[in-house]
Every structure is written in C-alpha cells, then in structure tokens.
Image: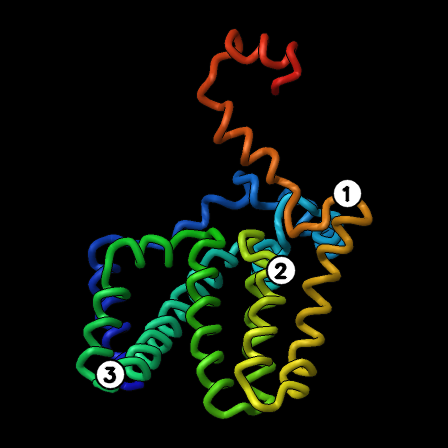
C-alpha cells in the first residue's frame, strides 16, 4: 500500500507540474448530462424520468453540485483522483495475484497509471474513467469472492457490477445475469451467491423496467438508435439521404 501510494503521489506531482488540471467542462453541455437547473432543483425526479443514459454519472454530478455548489469541480477532481489511486492498488493486487511477483506488480501498475492516456481520462468529467474504476474493483472482488466465498465480498462484487450497469449502458443487464450465473457455478455455496446478488440485480432490473414502462425500451439507455444512425448516416449528405428516406430504406 505504501509503495503504490508513493507511486500515485509521484505521478500526481509530475503531471500537476506539467499543467494537468481536472476538466469539468463537459457539464452541463454534453448530452450525457441532465440540464444543470433540473439537476440542481429537481434531481431525483429528473434522474428517474431520464432515459437517454443510465443514472450513475448524473447522480454523482448532481450530489456534488448540491453539496458543494461552485466547489463541485474541486470535489469531483478529488473523487476521480482518489479513484485513480484505488485503481493503482487494484492493479497491483491483481497482477500480484496472477504472477506472484511484486516486481511485476509494480511494473504493471506503473506502466498503466503513469501513462498519459490514463491521466487524461482520470482528469475528465465523463463516465469513461468511472468504468475503469468499477471494472478493476469488480475484478478484485471477484477473486476475493472465489477465494474466500464470504458474503461481504460477494455483496461488494455484485454491488460494483450493479453500479457499472447503472453507469454505462454498454454493460447490459443480461451481462450482469451471466456473471451472477458464473460465480454461482464456480463457488460451492450457490445459495449465498444468489442471495448476495439479489438486491443489486433487483435495483438494476428496476431501472430497465422503468425505461420499459415509460418509454417502451427494456434497456439502460434509449440512445441505441441515435448511436446507430451516427455510425450509419452522419457522414452522408442530405441529398444522399433524402431518396433513401423516401424509399423507406432509412
């Protein structure tokens, strides 16, 4: 812990000296965020009726601005950078678990957390880095669950996976169910695993069910069509698209 902590501190000092600062400018202009006024004054209602994206990022930003106001970017910077230190510890633990050597663990951790790409996303207000954090934590808790089989580690694993499902729609509810099934199969105490996963799985399912009830889409996000159209038609001109629309092809 001390070694990885020193590595994280050296990294922070070096990149801060180079001028790297936390970029909170995506809020509120990016489409991933609910309108700033709604997030301030009617946060819970707005998040509940939001369907474009899962709620995780907006919950974090909404709480930050409600608690700290203009100081929210500083708070979010601390959250993201503390999460970066947690990722470093997780990478060290995972590499040590897989290789059995501390040297490999230090080298792997240093290569990842010192890389410019890692630091860039760590200092950018978007769900991308949160995904990295949750994936690393889920990997650590998975190993602990398989090694020890304790209820506490199982709950930590499935709570982390639920947070991931509720942060990025790429991690689908069906994927969550498959992971639960695998862990239940891989451990001797299947009933304990199923009990530990019940509440996180129910909360994730509730979000999907809510979107289906209000918007007719059993999904974490209703932007699949928009994303597909951006890939398929955004580079075409209006003159090229118009005949395809008239023919019903698009």
Instruction: Establish if 79 lies above or below 54.
Output: below
Residue occupied by mark 2: 174
Q: Are marks 2 and 3 in contact (CB under 8 Å)?
A: no
* Image spot of residue 239 (x, y percent): 52, 7
Q: Secondary structure at mark 2?
A: helix
* Number of marks drawn: 3
Quadrant of the rendering where the N terminus is positioned: bottom left
Q: Earlier in the sequence, mark 2 or mark 3?
A: 3
Q: Gap between marks 2 and 3, in whole Å?
A: 39 Å
Q: Earlier in the sequence, mark 2 or mark 1?
A: 2
Image quadrant of residue 31?
A: top right
Who is closer to the viewer here, 54 or 16?
54
Image quadrant of residue 192?
A: bottom right
In the orientation shown, which residue stands out farthest toward the right? 213
- In this view of the protein, can residue 138 be seen by the observer? yes
Residue occupied by mark 3: 3
Q: At 65% across and 52% down in the image, what residue appears? A: 220
Q: At 70% across and 76% down in the image, what residue appears? A: 198
Q: At 73% across and 45% down in the image, what residue appears? A: 217
Q: Gap between marks 3 and 1, in whole Å?
A: 50 Å
* Image spot of residue 66 (x, y percent): 63, 59
Who is closer to the viewer here, 178 or 84?
178
**Which mark, by number, is residue 215?**
1
Q: Earlier in the sequence, mark 3 or mark 1?
A: 3
Taking the image as shown, residue 115 lies to the left or right of residue 30, namely left
Taking the image as shown, residue 13 lies to the left or right of residue 160, namely left
């Amino acid at each position: 812990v001390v070694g990885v902590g020193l590595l994280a501190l050296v990294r922070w000092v070096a990149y801060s000296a180079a001028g790297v600062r936390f970029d909170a400018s995506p809020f509120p202009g990016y489409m991933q965020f609910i309108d700033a006024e709604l997030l301030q004054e009617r946060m819970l209602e707005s998040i509940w009726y939001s369907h474009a994206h899962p709620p995780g990022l907006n919950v974090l930003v909404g709480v930050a601005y409600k608690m700290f106001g203009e100081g929210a970017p500083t708070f979010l910077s601390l959250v993201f950078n503390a999460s970066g230190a947690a990722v470093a510890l997780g990478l060290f633990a995972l590499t040590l678990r897989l290789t059995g050597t501390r040297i490999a663990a230090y080298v792997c951790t240093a290569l990842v957390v010192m890389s410019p790409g890692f630091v860039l996303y760590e200092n950018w207000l978007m769900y991308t880095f949160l995904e990295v954090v949750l994936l690393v934590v889920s990997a650590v808790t998975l190993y602990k669950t398989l090694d020890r089989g304790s209820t506490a580690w199982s709950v930590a694993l499935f709570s982390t996976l639920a947070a991931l499902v509720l942060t990025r729609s790429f991690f689908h509810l069906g994927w969550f169910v498959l992971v639960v099934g695998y862990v239940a199969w891989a451990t001797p105490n299947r009933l304990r695993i199923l009990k530990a996963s019940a509440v996180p799985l129910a909360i994730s399912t509730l979000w999907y069910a809510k979107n289906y009830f209000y918007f007719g889409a059993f999904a974490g996000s209703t932007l699949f069509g928009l994303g597909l159209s951006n890939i398929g038609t955004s580079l075409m001109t209006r003159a090229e698209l118009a005949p395809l629309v008239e023919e019903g092809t698009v």
